[in-house]
Every structure is written in structure tokens, then in C-alpha cells.
Image (tube, rainbow, N blue to C red):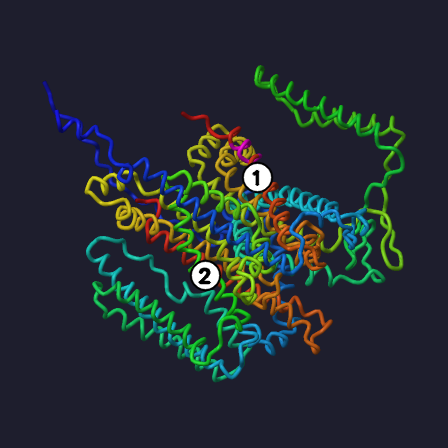
Amino acid sequence: MDTRTLEPLAVPEIAPPERSLPPGRWVKENLFSSWFNGVLTVLLAALLGWALYKIGRFVFVDARWEIVEVNLTNILVFRFPREELWRLWVALYVLAAAFGLGAGVATRVRSEDVRQGRATPPARLMTLRRLGPLLAVVAVFLWFAKSVEATILVAGIAATWIAARAGGRFVPPRHARRAGAAVLVGVAAAYLVVSAFGGVGWERWGGLLLTVFLAVGGIVISFPLGVLLALGRRSSFPAVRVVCVAYIELVRGVPLITILFLGAFMLGFFLPPGSETPSLEARALVGLVLFTAAYVAEIVRGGLQSVPREQTEAAVALGLSPLKTMRLIVLPQALRAVIPALVGQFISLFKDTSLVFIIGLTELLAVSELITKQPEFLAEGLIIETLVFAGFVYWAGSYWMSRESQRLERRLGVGER
Amino acid sequence: MTTLESVSRRPPPWRNVRVLRIAFQAAFVFAVALFALYLFANLVRNLDRLGIDTSFDYLSQPAGFAIPDSDFRSTEDLFAALLVGAKNTLFISLLGIFLATILGVVVGVARLSSNWLVRRTAALYVESLRNVPVLLIILFWYLGVLLQLPPIGRAVEWEVLVVSNRGLVGPGLRQTDDLLVLVVVAAAGMAVAATVWIWRTRRFDRTGEPHRRVLWSGGVLLGFLLVGYVAGGMPLAVSLPERGELATTGGFRLSPEYAALLIGLTLYTASHIAEIVRGSILSVPIGQTEAADAVGLSSFDRLRFIVLPQAFRVAIPPVGNQYLNLVKNSSLGVAIAFPEVTRITRITISQGGPAPQAIVVLMGVYLVFSLSIALVMNLVNRRFALKGR
């Protein structure tokens, strides 16, 4: 009897041929492949041309950008005392150094991983292109500032970042954890530089600074709360589950503005009688945190569900206590899987901070509306200019982060493991 | 045997897992209840100190404010005002959902067009609107566009359309007689049309002949409406807007607030729905498209009968989420003084109404809306989900 088995035929995988068409063919295939497509192309091109002309004319000719030029500092920080602005510059330098170091270490770790075959080489995407939207915003700000000092200071920040990143590449990968801690210390230091030692507390911040602070503070504080809620929702104790589910679903069922109202109008009532009511900024932050925690909880729950049961079973078989199983086995895998979704939530929060405008805080959007009521700009109809500018800042931040999160998703291989 | 006995002996309560579990949960519930009670006690004491009533009696107080574009008078009570607000929220949400779905599907399909320009334009639309706060879009349309329109004295008139910063006015319907007959006949027409729809569908399933159910049912409904209109003594007349000194009379008026909120919600939500539609179309295996091409379907038929029905199934849950977001985002009408339920609550609070109760009622209204939509979407999902094991 012939016991030979059939060897599967080895078919070499051939990549599809690169198609590069001559311009004429490209236009025909991509724009005029059928009469319908042709009509569509012509109509859309006419419409787009008209819109582009209008927009271009507005941006470069008609718009009276002086309202933005005059109010640039207001848009950035609003009430922040001008004589303390140096603190913000120092803080930016500290942040640039800290994050540059972190980026350098991360690059080193990654190239190390690639060399040992534990990771695929990074997609070749130039740093400049990645940071495109951010650089565009900085460039526009500098253009409006028309100030040599500001330009030099910003260039200094960029140089600090590059230098710190280069320095970070000399840190051996085994110290990666310490580098992470260094970044956190840097952030804390930057905060202290601005607010401590006779500085300006965050309750007196405004404009873009307040927007960024509310978004970052909101996500950082709501993260541990969200993890606890997610664990509670998946707990084996029915009573814990019910409480967590009730909170999550209640918050997710109502608009953010109602929770901000709750913070703005009611938070003082919940404190013991006679105690001082926190500032409106603090109450808004509490509202944002209560709201975001429920969404973070749902994201983390998704991550927890994505960890295979076998991981828990293996941990139990090794004799780990439930707490250790969660802390050492399940949570690290779950949180790693949800990082891109958390970035997405952060983007939502960044955009949603604009709602504190309604309860009377002066963040980016509120300032954009407020400055049109200055005596020299009143009734001039310049709201379009300021809103377009604010929209551009929001857009650049969100767009940049959403692209970074897509990159992160690919790098972490979410959905591939 | 002694060992067996010692195993089967009950452990003492402090080492019995069942007892411990119950004890832990009791402690947890106790702690949560204690915390809630503490907050509530503070609330009551604070309200007492400020002399604020803790009952819901304020709802039967006269409102003291009028609501534009409604029959609401300031002498009616707050409860009625809230109902008007909830109605406005509901209507603008439903209209927004309808429009955002259409726009979202069109843009989502355009994102995958074979035409480079169409593809790029759709991507530009999605990427620019998705990354901007919806509140900014609404404010832009309200403050930047609609309120910048010429005042009523210099309103732009295009045939039957009057455009000014007091709103957009187009042709509308005016009631001239009792509507009862028309309503009754229309209801009967709808029932008959539905029956015809089912009959045509069943016939199609049985014989395979074209069902043409839209044509059939639409014709039936139109016939009924016509009969009802004539039989009821022609109770409706077309009313064209006429520009006066201070306002337009007649016609159907879209206030700037309403238009801004509707446009903002629609554009923003459509950009999200477009991304979902694109993702769901991409999730349909390429073999389906190739098979449709192989049997000679036109590109429209391919989309209509092969790709979209399968993509639809994947898209239902995330699109339902977007609908929920739209309803919740309609609360941003408060920023531009559109009289929806949040705005009414805001006015109530600023007029000295009790904030705690007002906010609880407001949250209750949104919870009802959210749960209803979630319920409907779940039913739709169950109806269309693949029947698996």
C-alpha cells in the first residue's frame, strides 16, 4: 500500500503587480469610468471649485483676522495673569523634555524588539507628517503672534524635545519603566511650576489651557473609577454588579449637559452644610469625571471580555489569588487591548469640554464667543472668524490624536492576537 | 472514615464561602446605601436651610415664560412647559435621525466610490466634521450663518421662500376646516396600504413576480388621501409666506434656532454614520460583490440587493448608538435658546425653581427617550440578525 501522503503544492505567494498608470489612463479610470461617473466628476468639481474659491477668499482676503490676532493670549489662556505667563513657558519646556525622553526610550525599546524579532518594524511614517496637524496649529499661532520672542521660545521647545529624544535613545531598555516614571514626574513638575510657589491655580486658567486641562484631568481621574466600575460590573457578587450596572447605564442614558448641570447647580448641596461650595471649574471637572467614568468602564469591560478564559484558569491553576490573577494576568492584557479605544474616549472628552461653555466656564469655545463682544468688535459680525479659528484648533487636536490612535492600534496588534 | 467526616463537616461560618459572600455583599450594599443616605441628608438639610421645597409641587406652578413657536402661554404650569420641551426634543431628534441616516448612508457609500473625486470629497467631509465639537458646529450655523442673514426688512425672497434672520419661511399648509374626516380616512388608507404591502410581498415570495409594493401601497394611500380630502370638504389649503414689516405671515416657518440645531445635529451625526456605513460595507466579503458582478447585476443593483442588505445587519447596533447620541446632543439646543426640554429646565432653574428636582426630571425624560430608542433598536436588531445557533 502506498502510504505517501499528498504534499500540499507549494505555491509561492506573489504580490499583486504594482499598478502605475499613465496620467491619461488614471484620469479615465478614476474619474470618467462611466458616463454617470463623468457627470458626477464634472458636477462635483464645479461645486468643489466654487466652495474652495469661497473658502479661500474668506480665509485669505475677506476674513478680518485681527480679532484673533489681538486676542491670541485670551484664546490660549484667558484669565491667566499675564505677569505669570513665564510659568507656562517653563512648564512647556519641562513637558517637552519629559515626553521627548519618553519617546526616545520607546523608540529604543521598539528597535530592540524588532531586532529580536518580537515586533514588526514600524511603518515608515515621518515624524513631521505624523505631527502635521499640531505643527499647523503652532504655525498659525506664531503667524498671528508675529512675535520674535514667541517664535524663538517655540523653536526652543522643539529643540528640547529633539534633544531629550536623542538622549532617551541611550537609556538601556531595562530602565524603560523608570523612564515612564520620569515622564509622570515631568508632568507633575510642569503642573507644579504653573500652580505652586505663588503660581496660578487651575481654577484661574482659561481658554485652550483650560480645555486641555479639563480633558486630561477628566480622563486621568475617571480612568481608575472606570476600571473599578468595569470590575464591579463583571464581579461575581450580584449586589456589586447591580450597583455598577445601574450607575453606568444611568449615566450613559443622559446627556453630558445634564450631568454638568448636576455639578454646577447641585454639587454644593451634597456637601455637609456650612462647607464652602467648590469653584465652578471644580464642579465642572467633577461632572466630566462622573460622565467619562461610565464610558471608560464600558471600554474596559470590553477589554476584560477580550482576555481568554484560559488565562484566568491558568492563573488559578498556578495558585494565584483572585486579586493577583486580576492584577498580574487579566488587567494588563485587558488594558493593553483598550488603549486605542481610550484614546478615542479622550478625543470625545476633548471635544465635549466645549459644553462647559453652557454652564459659564471660559474655555476655548466660550472665549471665541466672548471676544466678539468686546467693544471694538461688537456687532461687527466677526463670530465666523473666531469660530473657524477655534474649530481649526479642535480639529487639529482631534485629528492628530485619532491618527495616533490608529497607529497605536496597528502597533499593538489589537484584534490580531 | 474520619477524613471523609472532616471533609463533609461544615466549615465554621467565618470560613464558609457562601456566608462570606453574602456578608461581603451586605456590607457593600450597606456602605453604598450609607453614602447615598449621607448625600441625601446633606441635600435635604441644605435645601431646608435655604428654604427650598423638596417636593415636586413646583411643576404645577405657573411657568411665567412663553415658548416661541408654540401655543404655550406663560400662565400654564411648568409641567405643561416641560411637555412642550420634550415634544420639541422628540421631533427634532426624529427629524435629525431621519436626515442624518440618509446623508450618512450617501456619504458612506461615496467614501467607497470608484470615482476618485467623490471618494476624496466624502473623506474630506467626514474627517473635517467628525473632529470638531458638535456644539461648535451648531453655534457656527446659528451665530455665524443664520443670524447673519439680512433682517426682515431686507429679507431675500425666492419665489415662495423668504429668508431672513428671523428664520426660513416656505410654503406650508393652513387648516380651513375640520380635519376629522380626513384623519379617519387617512388612517384607514394606511391600514389598507399596509395590507396591500404584505399581500404583494407574499405574492412575490410565492411566485417571484415583481412585487412593486412601493407603487401599489403608495397608490392606494394616495387614493385614500384624495378621497378623504374631497369628502372632508377640502380642509387644508396651501399657504404661501408673505413678508410684512416685522414678520412674515403664513407659510411654514423654520426658526433660526430650530434650523441651526437640526443642521448641526444632522451634519455631525451623518459624519459618524458615514464611517459606520463604510466599515459595514467593507465587512461584506468581496466574494459577494464579485458574485453579483458575475451574474450581471448593475452596480446600483449590486449595492441595493447584495451589499447594502448585508452591511445593514452589521451597521444596526453602532448606528443605534449614534441615534442615541443624536437625541442626547439635541440637549445642546440650550446653548442657542431652542426651547427643548433642557432649555426649559434651565429657565426653570434660573427663575428660582428647585434645581435638584428639575434636574432629576430632566434626566428622567432623557432616560425614557434613551431606553425607548435602545428598545426599538434591539427589536430591529433581533429582526435582522442572522439566525444562528
- Considering every residue shown, the one lying at the far left of the view is A1
Q: Given this view, does label 2 or label 1 mark the residue nearer the observer?
A: 1
Does residue A136 lie above or below B175 as drawn? below
Tag 1 subunit: B
- Considering every residue shown, the one lying at the far top of the view is B206
Does residue A187 lie above or below B332 as drawn? below
Quadrant where the C terminus of chain B lies?
Answer: top left
Residue at 73% across, 71% down = A379
What residue is pinned by disc 1? B371
**Proximity of marks 2 and 1: CB atoms separated by less than 8 Å:** no
Residue A316, position as x, y percentages in the image: 23, 41
In depth, the one of B59 and B318 nearer the eye is: B59
Residue A35 in sight from this viewpoint: no
In depth, the one of A180 and A10 nearer the eye is: A180
Q: Is residue B4 left or right of residue A46?
A: left
Does residue A362 lie above or below A146 as drawn? above
Q: Are marks 2 and 1 on the same chain?
A: no
Residue A194 in sight from this viewpoint: yes
| Amino acid beneath label 2 | Trp
Residue B150, position as x, y percentages in the image: 78, 62
Crowding near pointer 2: few (<14 within 10 Å), some, many (20+)? some
Residue at 87% across, 28% down = B232
In depth, the one of A69 and A272 nearer the eye is: A272
Q: Main secondary structure of the magenta part?
A: helix
What residue is pinned by disc 2? A400
Q: Which residues are magenta?
A: B376-381
Secondary structure beneath dot 1 equals helix
Question: Number of labelled discs?
Answer: 2
In depth, the one of B138 and A61 nearer the eye is: B138
